Amino acid sequence: MPAVSKGDGMRGLAVFISDIRNCKSKEAEIKRINKELANIRSKFKGDRALDGYSKKKYVCKLLFIFLLGHDIDFGHMEAVNLLSSNRYTEKQIGYLFISVLVNSNSELIRLINNAIKNDLASRNPTFMGLALHCIANVGSREMAEAFAGEIPRILVAGDTMDSVKQSAALCLLRLYRTSPDLVPMGDWTSRVVHLLNDQHLGVVTAATSLITTLAQKNPEEFKTSVSLAVSRLSRIVTSASTDLQDYTYYFVPAPWLSVKLLRLLQCYPPPDPAVRGRLTECLEAILNKAQEPPKSKKVQHSNAKNAVLFEAISLVIHHDSEPNLLVRACNQLGQFLQHRETNLRYLALESMCTLASSEFSHEAVKTHIETVINALKTERDVSVRQRAVDLLYAMCDRSNAQQIVAEMLSYLETADYSIREEIVLKVAILAEKYAVDYTWYVDTILNLIRIAGDYVSEEVWYRVIQIVINRDDVQGYAAKTVFEALQASACHENLVKVGGYILGEFGNLIAGDPRSSPLTQFHLLHSKFHLCSVPTRALLLSTYIKFVNLFPEVKGTIQDVLRSDSQLKNADVELQQRAVEYLRLSTVASTDILATVLEEMPPFPERESSILAKLKKKKGPSTVTDLEEAKRERSADVNGGPEPAPASTSAVSTPSPSADLLGLGAAPPVPAGPPPSSGGLLVDVFSDSPSAAAPLAPGSEDNFARFVCKNNGVLFENQLLQIGLKSEFRQNLGRMFIFYGNKTSTQFLNFTPTLICSDDLQANILGPTKPVDPAVDGGAQVQQAVNIECVSDFTEAPVLNIQFRYGGTFQNVSVKLPITLNKFFQPTEMASQDFFQRWKQLSNPQQEVQSIFKAKHPMDTEVTKAKIIGFGSALLEEVDPNPANFVGAGIIHTRTAQIGCLLRLEPNLQAQMYRLTLRTSRETVSQRLCELLSEQF
Amino acid sequence: MIKFFLMVNKQGQTRLSKYYEHVEINKRTLLETEVIKSCLSRSSEQCSFIEYKDFKLIYRQYAALFIVVGVNDTENEMAIYEFIHNFVEVLDDYFSRVTIHNSKEQFKPPSAKLSEGGTNEQHRVGKAQVLPSSVHTCCV
């Protein structure tokens, strides 16, 4: 094949380039270029037809000029002419020009496509290669439209040369990435899978890339690739170091291909036992090789070997089912932690982080704690230290929390600014999650604020207050500690906030000690007042009015402060208003009223830690969430500790109605939030907005999921209110009775439940509701009926919002009402033959939705059966050839249509995974049912 | 998956860039400036992987030349790191000595190795097998 041969060089071009090089100034260069452009133009326009060589030469010059940054507005036609040349070098320059300079809406595109078509059909491997490269390089939608059908054919044709197959696979991959909808799956897919067996490793490599990408979207279509990939991998791993000739890289056989095969296997759950045994052997062999003495001292050898090793470890972690391999992987990474190569230390920390979330290897990871802590202290590279922090966070559990938190705190003092905020969040989360002793928690957070106050976000100090309020055993200690911390001459504003809030609530607990008498407490706080920002001052003013209630003896002092001009005539309207109102309140209200207004804060409802939510947001939803979720499961398993707050993301930091008043954003604890029961003045200030529906109640999402497979039960319960449901559905109609129980002895006033449906939903389900009596007596239960009709399929669920007044406080509760599509299921019994016949009829790719997921509950056959029946479909026995699988059938009734649904659930006990496949005649229905059902196991 | 491939000199000028995901031309300049800045500022003691926005940068330095590859977070860092070296070895074989110079040969580096955002192993010796193809050279 003609590559760069000296004889073929274009002298004219070389001269032109060296002329440009020798230009002393920009002007000279432009002059030279303009001269050349004029020359080329005249040649192209000339009467004499140019030969291929000249055309090539001039097109090349144009290309060079373009790459220098000048516009080229002619020569395209000549370049397109070059495409039909039979000389390689001319064709090549033509394609090069096209790839670089022609955009997709050019009018020449038809001519170009025609030339490409001819080359693809030419059976000349070089020309086919050029054409494929051009398609891939341009990679536009138009290219995909023109050639996406043709390339699979070339790829799987028996007589296609290896080099062309390679290009075709990569070209198809490129088109699939830009326009997946234009690359239809079809018969060719099964033949592509067999390319994994090809003799030519280049073809295998290209095919593996293609299959991996396709398999991510269409796992079912490509599942046969698993066994082929394993056997190919096994052949590579066991080959002698020189067997693969050109594909051996510094004595490592086909490292990049191995990595790709291992990646492909990560698209699937662990394979069947037979294949699995072979795969395990491969993985063991890779781990063994890491221990063998290197075959070469060259760093390339070990790098390539380690690349394969890291990918193998990822696969082991992905399968998460072979304890032996997981522990070996962990030990191997442990060795790398002390390797002199920074890259290896970095990667080892990174991989170990995912290993820590597997229950099999968590303990093994923990043994490396000292090394990791050491890395945190001595590592010179901030990105490596960052990984060490991540790993410490991941390996933390009850047994080592105190040590890890202490190390992180001490690292924080010297940590790089870029990662401080994240460390602060992590420390705060760990301290809360593993706090056995809440005094330790309070100490840790106050330390955190002292060391890195600027990086302590609002969420962190809100959370301390929530916890202190909710736990009476720690309140006295917290008050004492913040009081001591505030003694420091310079303390961070966040500390003042925490201090102000806690002393305002619990200052009385330490007032007995003469060193922290009420007046001392007040003076201490007030000494910080002038250094603080407006929101903090506002908070402190609330603290002062609370002091008036707690300590009548300081009332005079506080009134003086409130009365001073700097407060009453403050330029900030919020501060001024507070000063005026609090001063008035302290003068007019009797002690009883004061005590009611300024009663201790009620406990906060449990909700997802706002800090955790923040960390998730910071890190992006994908990575950390998974890790967190995994950790959450593990922390329940390993420690048997209390389950952290439910993960319903909708429940993130519920702002209370009057939060805006304080200008604190979505601040859950409202420092000045006395219930607006009395004190005429205050009622106006705290007038809440009953029109705003509360965000979903915590745990609502969980309850919602429980109701997918059942119709009756308790939907929601808190200290005041219980909501029960009883519902029945027939065909496309349903009726739901909602019972509201008042759990208190006081009457609820203005009791108004409302059903909130999005417009979309409103059109699909109809639910007229009768209003209920606005007064609900203490201990009484009222009932409300909702009629539902399913007009067409829907995905959302309506939200039930309940607003009422209880003892003068406004209450607002929102829960998701479990009206789901599967409620309109009618079971259908059918025989095995019928089932599979229908199954085949629904083989259109849009009709099938599949999901592979990990079991969340123990995999019990009877429970699973009950759930499928509860879901609404018929459970068909003896239909699936594999008795362990479950199949079901039913019809979804809507007003306008009846949609037949078939489902199949395949449990994999060993991997604790399920695969759920749904085929229905409507895509949206398949999708929704799959979502609903996959949450159940 | 590889998102882009850059060759940059020590002065921070892009010598070669190839994108495997569509990025607008004006955004490319911005991206390249930032990417280069973060690579140039690192010392030899630091590791060769940088987290940058939602992807990872993997870089290697050859004398005055930096090769930077941007990948998504599922990519195997070590494999890409060594792939860069393999790429340089192939260039070396092909052109006898890799320098970034202003010649017509610049038009024809073997980009088949890098095809479509994935590493594609190639014969290291059989240079005739390397299909010359277009790598978009930036202005030199």
Image (tube, coloured by chain):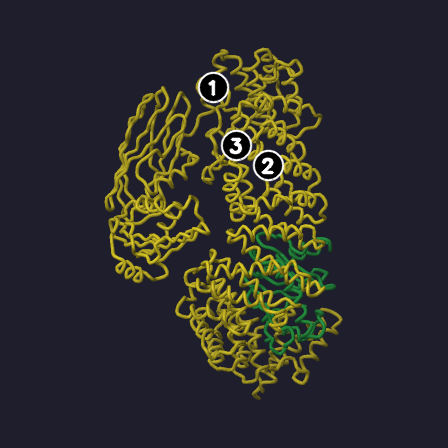
Element marked by disc 3: loop
Q: What's the amino acid at mark 2?
A: Ser
Q: Which residue is mark 2?
A: A399
Residue A435: x and y, percent? Answer: 57, 32
Q: What's the amino acid at mark 3?
A: Ala
Do callouts 1 and 3 mark residues in contact (Cβ within 8 Å)? no
Alpha-carbon span between mark 2 and mark 3: 33 Å
Query: Can residue A795 be spotted in the picture?
Result: yes
Q: Is residue A718 above or below residue B80?
A: above
Q: Which chain is green?
A: B
Alpha-carbon span between mark 1 and mark 3: 23 Å
Residue A667 has which mark?
3
Q: Chain of mark 3?
A: A
**Is residue A244 toward the left or the right of residue A755 in the image?**
right
Q: What's the amino acid at mark 1?
A: Leu
Would you identify the image quadrant in which residue A51 lies?
bottom right
Q: Are marks 2 and 1 on the same chain?
A: yes
Q: Is residue A408 above or below residue A915?
A: above
Residue A407 has which mark?
none
Query: Can residue A142 be spotted in the picture?
Result: no
Q: Chain of mark 1?
A: A
Specify the colour of chain A: yellow
Q: Chain of mark 2?
A: A
Picture mark count: 3
Alpha-carbon span between mark 2 and mark 1: 53 Å
Q: Which residue is mark 1?
A: A681
Q: Are marks 1 and 3 on the same chain?
A: yes
Element marked by disc 2: loop
Q: Nearer the viewer, residue A623 or A192?
A: A192
Sequence-wise first label, 1 or 3: 3
Q: Residues within 10 Å of mark 2 (few under 14, many from 20)?
A: few
Q: Nearer the viewer, residue A697 or A533?
A: A697
